[in-house]
Amino acid sequence: QVHLVESGGGLVQAGGSLRLRCAVSGRAITDYSMGWFRQAPGKEREFVGVIDWAGDSSYFADSVKGRFTISKDNTKNTVDLQMSSLKPEDTAIYYCAAQGVGSYEWDYWGQGTQVTVSS
């Protein structure tokens, strides 16, 4: 069984930075593309960004492009979402997810971590 656990959320002022971490157990993260999603109160969950299984490429939603980056540490089996220049509209619960190679769905999800950006 694969488990994903997010950490690193918290309260930050607008313009600040946070680093979220997704720790994966049960399988090597090299078997998965790893994505980040978020859900703000009263809104649907939305895509934030993804890094491919090899860690060679990543892409992001327009709303976070240039401010967020994703990195993988295969030795630690973790994936980080580095968030900078945070805005109040970035406030949400952030989730990491894993998509197996060849899969068309996000196969596993974490429980989420709250990020709150104050103005």
Image: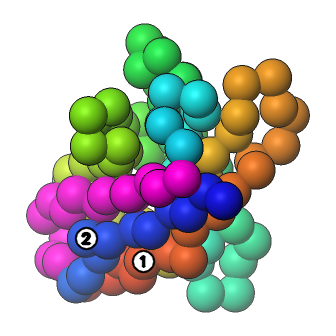
Magenta: main secondary structure equals strand
Residue appearing at x 60%, y 33% in the figure: 32
Report if residue 29 is visible in the image.
Answer: yes
Q: In the rendered view, how is the structure colored?
A: rainbow
Mark 2, other Cα within 10 Å: few <14 / some 14–19 / many ≥20: some
Q: Quadrant of the N terminus?
A: bottom right
Residues at circles 1 and 2 in contact by the CB criterion of under 8 Å: yes
Q: Which residue is mark 2?
A: 8
Amino acid carrying mark 1 in the image: Thr
In the image, 29 versus 61, the foreground residue is 29
Tag shown at residue 57: none
Percent of width and height locating residue 14 = 20, 70
Q: Quadrant of residue 76?
A: top left
Where is 11 relative to 15, above or below? below
Q: Is residue 64 left or right of residue 61?
A: left
Residue appearing at x 47%, y 56% in the figure: 25
Percent of width and height locating residue 92 = 48, 76
Q: Which residues are magenta?
A: 12-26
Q: Is residue 100 left or right of residue 93?
A: right
Percent of width and height locating residue 86 = 26, 61
Where is 27 relative to 8, above or below? above
Report if residue 62 is visible in the image.
Answer: no
Tag shown at residue 113: 1
Percent of width and height locating residue 97 = 60, 53
Q: Quadrant of the C terminus?
A: bottom left
Q: Is residue 99 left or right of residue 96?
A: right
In the image, 55 versus 11, the foreground residue is 55
Q: Secondary structure at mark 2?
A: loop
Amino acid carrying mark 2 in the image: Gly
Residue appearing at x 40%, y 81% in the figure: 114
